[in-house]
């Protein structure tokens, strides 16, 4: 059965409403994840380097499943989407590719995190086995939840007429916060256990290597294409996210002194990434359908899309601050006050929003012009670059306001 497509010719009221609802749900979920992070203060101190993993682990869920959602959204718009559980179908092959990438890249992220800690002089820190076990097991636990949400949203887009370009990026990237942070905390219970951690870490690395070889050579064309195209770009994205992690790890003392900032962190980074993901997904669909030209100077249609992103950014970023303050007061976390949180978020959010538009447009445009799939290449690079930008702008705003 084929499903009709809606030509995305303009930013309609329905689009704005869908985006706003999805972003609000995402911010609430991400704030809950941030509350878990703030409550894990003792674990962050006992396992130095754990905070370094957080942006990368969160972003990996959004990178992998955000790209899945963008590809499914394009399939819906082009009329090639079929809702089926068959392994060789559009949904089946995308989910198999996502599962393989989640295991392989989570293990690789653990190795890269240890290397990044050494390069940037973060010491003391967890062992290599600790990083691999926490990153991989936590990543797999979170991927199950995010994968279910992704398939559910794809089914909902067919059943209820949602535009996946509007809802997938904000919900997947920020609901990933809710799943990833608690999953990392649970997985961290297996860290620092000497022989057991070493054995599990070695087994995880062996399994990741085996899955990579199988997925790289699988006869399923779409799975093979997704894995081969995604591994290089996701590896680069992981490095960018780890640099973002270094930025927040080095401010750990300031974040623990004002725990509301820890509550805020996932929601702020998730919102910046979600805004970029919406714009990138929308542009990708336009380029695929020939409704817009991928040129260095944005068309009126692209500028209209960018303007719509800017208009909803302000209230959503303000909501991040309000929820972080409210959750911190209710749970007894330390806070610099609502006024200071709002100043930090709006200052950082204003800079981040401008960069969101630039990064999303030029990354997606470049991928399309070079004959690459912007759904596969655009989303991961957009989300990871924005994580790095978001971390820097948030820290700079903290310093400017005087809460760090």
Image (tube, rainbow, N blue to C red):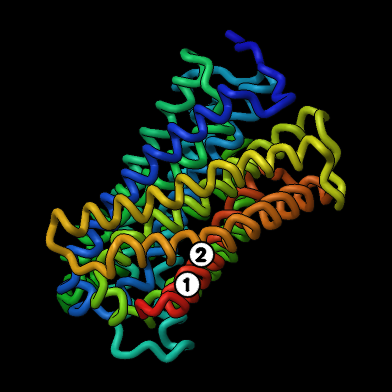
Can residue 355 be seen?
Answer: yes
Report the quarter where the N terminus lies: top right
Name the residue at 64% across, 24% down: 12
The residue at which mark 2 appears reads as 347
Q: Is mark 1 on a helix, strand or loop?
A: helix
Q: How crowded is mark 2: few (under 14 residues within 10 Å), some or many (20 or more)?
A: some
Disc 2 from disc 1: Cα separation: 6 Å
Relative image position of residue 360 (x, y in whole percent): 67, 51
Q: Which of marks 2 and 1 is nearer the N terminus?
A: 2
Q: Compared with residue 71, is residue 58 higher up or lower down, i.e. above or below?
A: below
Q: Compared with residue 363, is residue 190 higher up or lower down, i.e. above or below?
A: below
The residue at which mark 1 appears reads as 397
Relative image position of residue 144 (x, y in whole percent): 33, 41
Observer-nearest of 81 and 258: 258
Can residue 126 be seen?
Answer: no
Q: Residues within 10 Å of mark 1 (few under 14, many from 20)?
A: many
């Amino acid at each position: 059965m084929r499903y009709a497509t809606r030509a995305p010719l303009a930013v309609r009221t329905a689009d704005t409403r869908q985006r706003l609802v999805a972003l609000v749900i995402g911010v609430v979920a991400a704030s809950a994840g941030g509350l878990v992070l703030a409550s894990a203060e003792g674990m962050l101190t006992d396992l130095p380097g754990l905070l370094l993993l957080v942006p990368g682990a969160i972003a990996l869920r959004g990178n992998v499943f955000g790209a899945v959602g963008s590809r499914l959204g394009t399939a819906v718009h082009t009329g090639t989407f079929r809702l089926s559980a068959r392994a060789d179908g559009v949904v089946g092959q995308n989910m198999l590719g996502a599962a393989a990438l989640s295991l392989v890249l989570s293990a690789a992220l653990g190795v890269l995190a240890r290397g990044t800690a050494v390069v940037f002089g973060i010491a003391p820190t967890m062992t290599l086995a600790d990083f691999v076990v926490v990153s991989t097991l936590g990543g797999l636990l979170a991927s199950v939840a995010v994968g279910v949400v992704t398939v559910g949203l794809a089914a909902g887009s067919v059943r209820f007429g949602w535009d996946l370009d509007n809802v997938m990026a904000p919900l997947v990237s920020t609901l990933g916060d809710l799943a990833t942070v608690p999953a990392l905390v649970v997985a961290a219970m297996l860290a620092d256990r000497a022989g057991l951690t070493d054995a599990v870490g070695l087994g995880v690395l062996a399994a990741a290597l085996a899955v990579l070889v199988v997925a790289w050579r699988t006869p399923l064309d779409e799975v093979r294409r997704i894995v081969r195209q995604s591994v290089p770009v996701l590896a680069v994205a992981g490095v960018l996210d780890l640099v973002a992690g270094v930025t927040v790890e080095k401010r750990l003392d300031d974040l623990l002194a004002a725990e509301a900032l820890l509550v805020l962190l996932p929601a702020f980074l998730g919102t910046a990434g979600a805004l970029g993901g919406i714009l990138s997904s929308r542009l990708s669909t336009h380029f695929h359908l020939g409704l817009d030209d991928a040129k260095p100077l944005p068309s009126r249609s692209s500028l209209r899309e960018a303007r719509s992103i800017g208009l909803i950014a302000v209230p959503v970023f303000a909501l991040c601050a309000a929820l972080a303050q409210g959750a911190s007061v209710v749970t007894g976390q330390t806070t610099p006050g609502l006024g200071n949180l709002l100043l930090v978020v709006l200052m950082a959010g204003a800079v981040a929003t401008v960069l969101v538009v630039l990064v999303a447009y030029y990354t997606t445009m470049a991928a399309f012009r070079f004959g690459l799939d912007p759904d596969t290449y655009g989303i991961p690079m957009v989300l990871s670059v924005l994580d790095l930008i978001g971390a820097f702008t948030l820290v700079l705003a903290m310093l400017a306001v005087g809460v760090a």
